[in-house]
Amino acid sequence: MLAQLETRNLLIQGIVDSAGSPKKGADELGISVSMLSRIKNMERTLADDLKKKASAMSFKSALMIIKEVTGYDKLFSFFTKDRHPQNLIRRAKIEDVDSDRAFERIADRLTDKPADEDLTVEDIAYIQQEACEIAEGIEAKINALVGLAERYPRLKLEKMFTEKENICNKNGG
């Protein structure tokens, strides 16, 4: 319950930080400040049609919506300590190296094991542990992007990842 409350707090914090105030955040979503408060206190949920809108407002809010909807806490957790962009980038770089090594170790372990029944109990435990290493790398990269979006709003990373035509479009940009 405490983790869910923290997730909701971060969701609303992302909306408020993006808009500049609770009133402006509520207005952008088309709801009342009272409703925003009820969502934060877990008395209500954010309507499905507003999740996309909230996600476009704030990368942090998007991350919390994904976490709440999927339950994939390990991939979509929000780092609350050392939020300086350089710390987040450094952590992502370290985790990236560890993640790449984990992929290699998994590939090596799966040599000559094309089917599920070929895995031993030891293989399963080993690969699960390596998958955790990969998840930590994904989590660190996502948090680095969220940190950049928070620190440098002019980057407009939320728009970049939510709009159909964006700088990530390989055909146009």
Image (cartoon, rainbow, N blue to C red):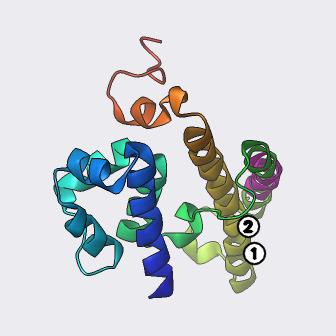
Under mark 1, the amino acid is Tyr
Q: Residues within 10 Å of mark 1 (few under 14, many from 20)?
A: some
Is 91 positioned to the left or the right of 23 in the image? Answer: right
Q: Where on the picture, by quarter, is residue 127?
A: bottom right
Does residue 169 lie above or below 150 as drawn?
Answer: above
Residue 101 is marked as none
Mark 2: which secondary structure? helix
Eye-nearest disc, 2 or 1:
2
Is 8 positioned to the left or the right of 39 in the image? Answer: right
Residue at 29%, 47% (x, y): give it.
Answer: 24
Provide the residue span drawn in magenta: 92-103
Q: Which residue is mark 2?
A: 130
Q: Residues within 10 Å of mark 2 (few under 14, many from 20)?
A: many
Q: CA distance from mark 2 to mark 1?
A: 6 Å
- Verify whether residue 25 appears in magenta: no
Does residue 21 lie above or below 113 as drawn?
Answer: above
Under mark 2, the amino acid is Glu
Residue 12 pos. (x, y %): 39, 62
Residue 117 visible? The answer is yes
Residue 63 pos. (x, y %): 46, 56
Q: Main secondary structure of the magenta part?
A: helix
Q: Nearer the viewer, residue 115 or 140?
A: 140
Q: Nearer the viewer, residue 74 or 26?
A: 26
Is 7 positioned to the left or the right of 38 in the image? Answer: right
Residue at 25%, 54% (x, y): give it.
Answer: 26
Mark 1: which secondary structure? helix
Residue 126 is marked as 1
Looking at the image, the residue that sits furthest to the bottom is: 1
Residue 54 pos. (x, y %): 32, 50
Decide: marks 2, 1 in contact (CB < 8 A)? yes
